[in-house]
Amino acid sequence: MTPFGAVITMPQTRFCRGDYALTFKFYQEARIPIWNMITAGHFEGGDFIVVKPGFVLCGYDGERSEKEGAEQSANGSAPTDWKRIRFRFSRISCISTFRSASSTISS
């Protein structure tokens, strides 16, 4: 979820692949706006972080989320004037990568 509406993602894990359809239906029935839908590769919502208004992190590891999905998410899930950082992470380095990326705009 973004401040502008929901982002429908495309999970890569086999048992979650149909979730996007249920999620889309839920948001439509609840009249919650849909801001974007990720269709270029797989991307899971937990890899999209609105750090603060004007700053978004989009990560990928190639296992849950792919570079193409992260690119589309970063480019289409925030207003064009927002700072976007896309990064590749490993499960072990996820926290340190996030801290490093966050410190780049600590203003």
Image (tube, rainbow, N blue to C red):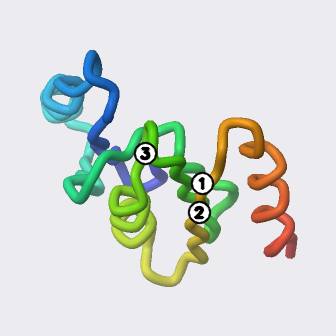
Which numbered circle lies on residue 65?
3
Q: Residue at x 40, y 52 (%)?
A: 66
- Up/down of 40 relative to 16, above or below: below
In the rendering, at what x and y percent does residue 79 appear?
A: 43, 73
In the rendering, at what x and y percent does residue 62 appear?
A: 46, 47
Q: Residue at x 60, y 54 (%)?
A: 50
The disc labelled 3 sits on which kind of residue?
Answer: Ser
Distance from Cα at disc 1 to Cα at disc 2:
5 Å
Which numbered circle lies on residue 56?
2
Question: How busy is the neighbourhood of tag 3: few (under 14 within 10 Å), some, or many (20 plus)?
Answer: many
The quadrant where residue 97 appears: bottom right
- Up/down of 86 relative to 26, above or below: below
The disc labelled 1 sits on which kind of residue?
Answer: Val
> For the residue labelled by badge 3, is the local secondary structure a helix, a strand or a loop?
loop
Is 23 left, or right, of 44 in this rendering?
Answer: left
Of the numbered discs 3 and 2, the one sitting upstream in the chain is: 2
Task: Tell me whether the residue at label 1 lies in contact with that at label 2, contact meaning CB atoms closer than 8 angstroms.
Answer: yes
Q: Which residue is mark 1?
A: 50
In the rendering, at what x and y percent does residue 82 appear?
A: 55, 76
Pair 3/2: label in front? 3
Question: How busy is the neighbourhood of tag 1: few (under 14 within 10 Å), some, or many (20 plus)?
Answer: some
Q: Residue at x 77, y 45 (%)?
A: 93
